[in-house]
Amino acid sequence: MAPSIRYLLGYILVSWCAASIAQAPDTPAATPASAPAPAPAASQPRNDYSKPETWLCRPGRKDACSVDISSTVVSARGKLKRERFKANAKAPIDCFYVYPTVSQDATGNSDMIAGPDEENVVRAQFARLASQCRTFAPLYRQFTLPALRSSMSGKPIAADRTLPYNDVTDAWNYYLQHDNAGRGVVLVGHSQGSLMLTRLIADQIDGKPIQSQLVSALLLGSNLAVPKDKDVGGTFKNIPLCRSSDQVGCTLAYASFRSSTPPPATSLFVKPPGEGMRVACVNPAALAGGSATLHSYLSNGGGTSTIPESKPWVTPERRIATPFVSVPGLLSAECITDERGSYLSVTVNADPNDPRTDDIAGDIVRDGKVAEDWGLHLVDANIAMGDLVSLVGQQAKAYAKQKK
């Protein structure tokens, strides 16, 4: 396994710690170096991904992707407008999603029963892509939040550390054999999900014939390694970073932080993974670089590890019934590379003179204090969801044109 992949395997603890702190604010934070390794568990039987219940999302059925994701657009003047969502039943490409660490199961690895945590994160991070692609999202036996908390307390519980990747690989291979039929595919992940997909791409796609069907890979909340001043040659040997909306076969990755609170030296999200390397940052709203406003879809409510509870959107407060809110012009972002590392710097363009909110939820808060190490990890996907959907739509057209 390449050194860059070994680095990413260590990074998974960052994701676990971020979600764990959000769920258990009284638990002391731990770094990958100090967190005890979970005890090994006996090997588990393989999942049978021919069974419908092993999938959160598949085309043509009512499931976690066919839910209400309507939004309310809140203008700077405080005007509210409802925005409805419609999936594309004739989408020309597929999207394959692996979700982040959300399971509250008491065991080291999660079970294969979908709960509200898995369903909620699909709604927040993936379901909106159904406007551009057929949606596939497997369940997998991920390392759980309780297992992480046990490890951090010095009493690790048994967990099979090979199981999550084996499950994702089996689901991917089932999809290729039974569903793909030569279609282009976008891989989408966040945090632990991005880690699983990064390894999958390095092991089974990069430099292989199937790479010709890769429309793009959206690896959010991750530390993807690339050489300094280059867009390819690090973790992936043949898959470059996305630099234009009509580019296919590329990858997009970033970790987001507020511009007012850049990553401290203790943050593990943005540090270069080795000599001559840097962490990839691609701004979904400005692929070639520079600053641009973000098209966000923020959760209206929530309170889970991945969907922070929102604040009032306008003053005086008015009831908003949709599950998501869009705030045009409120957020902008730019990829920054400095002595801290490489990261997506997000600015809240607050105006105290207008009735719209001047801030967003998304920070991890512990004992009443923001955990600056983690940045806006919990809303990495939400802050640019509209830009990601638009990008996938444009890449789908470019892919179709290329194939012709």
Image (tube, helix red, strand yellow):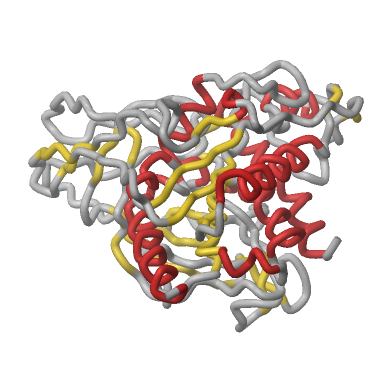
Residue at 13%, 47% (x, y): give it.
75
Residue 372 visible in the snapshot: no
Observer-nearest of 267 and 390:
390
Measured as percent of width and height from the top left, residue 25 is found at: 59, 25
Measured as percent of width and height from the top left, residue 282 is found at: 49, 67
Q: Determine the residue located farthest toward the top in the rendered image.
A: 106
Rendered view: 115 above or below 242: above
The quadrant of the image that shows the C terminus is bottom left
Q: Quadrant of residue 6?
A: bottom right
Is 253 placed left or right of 202 in the picture? left
Is 350 placed left or right of 194 in the picture? left
Rendered view: 40 above or below 278: above
Is 348 placed left or right of 172 in the picture? left
Rendered view: 283 above or below 142: below
Residue at 40%, 63% (x, y): give it.
396
Is 150 placed left or right of 121 in the picture? right
Measured as percent of width and height from the top left, residue 218 is found at: 52, 57
Residue at 21%, 25% (x, y): give it.
321
The quadrant of the image that shows the N terminus is bottom right
Residue 38 visible in the snapshot: yes
Q: Determine the residue located farthest toward the bottom in the rendered image.
A: 229
Observer-nearest of 161 and 311:
161
Q: Quadrant of residue 359?
A: top left
Measured as percent of width and height from the top left, residue 389 is found at: 36, 54
Residue at 37%, 50% (x, y): give it.
385
Instruction: Please count the marks in the image.
Output: 0
